[in-house]
Image: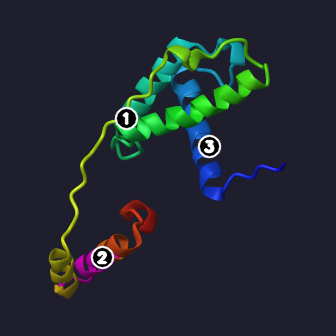
Amino acid sequence: MAFVLKRGTIKNYYTTEKYLYKFLLKKRRLKDIYLKQLNYEFITDFEHFLRNYRNSRKQLMLSNNGVMKYLEWFKKMVNLAVKLEWMHKNPFNQFQLQYQKYDRAYLSERELELLESTEFTSERLQRIKDCFVFSCYTGLSMVDIA
């Protein structure tokens, strides 16, 4: 049975790999490590790196749940290594992923209609409004639309 990952899923794994390489270079001064060197300390250090990672404009990049998603994808890679018997024990056994729950507020139908009928004089604000309304109807996040 052939198992094919979707393009978005593959992108998530590549981004996780990118963060792992940055972590290794910046915090461990290494380009690569052996699987047997992965342990609980490595995972917690990687988590700390992700929580504090800043882009070139010095902006924090990830929220708690973003950090947890990258750790989840990393955990899936480690689980595969354990299944393939490339590793004897799973360093994630003692690590707990902790997501934060958010209650999202939704616009009422009336609020959405008011927003749609609002015209901004600024072209930039009008474009932002159009993208937001589009995201309300499609369920796409503003990040995905951008």
Q: Residue at x 24, y 49 (%)?
A: 103
Which quadrant holds residue 87? top right
Label 2 belongs to which residue? 133
> Are there few (<14), some (14-19), or many (20+) residues within 10 Å of tag 2?
some
Mark 1: secondary structure? loop
Q: Residue at x 15, y 78 (%)?
A: 110
Q: Is residue 129 magenta?
A: yes
By secondary structure, the bulk of the magenta-drawn segment is best described as: helix
In front: label 2 or label 1 = 1
Q: Type of residue at label 2?
A: Val
Mark 2 or mark 3: whose residue is earlier in sequence: 3
> Which residue lies most toward the right here?
1
Residue 129, horizontal then vertical, whole percent: 26, 76
In front: label 1 or label 3 = 1
Mark 3: secondary structure? helix
Residue 118, horizontal then vertical, whole percent: 16, 85
Compared across the picture, whether 11 is left or right of 65 comes to: right
**Measured along the vertical axis of the image, is residue 122 above or below residue 98?**
below
Compared across the picture, whether 30 is left or right of 26 comes to: right
Q: Are marks 2 and 1 in contact (CB under 8 Å)?
A: no
Residue 53, horizontal then vertical, whole percent: 41, 35
Q: What is the number of the mark on residue 13?
A: 3
**Closer to us: 54 or 127:** 127
Q: How is the image coloured?
A: rainbow
Compared across the picture, whether 24 is left or right of 44 comes to: right
Label 1 belongs to which residue? 99
Q: Type of residue at label 1?
A: Tyr
Q: Residue at x 33, y 43 (%)?
A: 59
Q: Type of residue at label 3?
A: Tyr
Q: Is residue 115 magenta?
A: no
Q: CA distance from mark 2 to mark 1?
A: 28 Å
User: Where does the magenta region start and end?
Assistant: 120-131
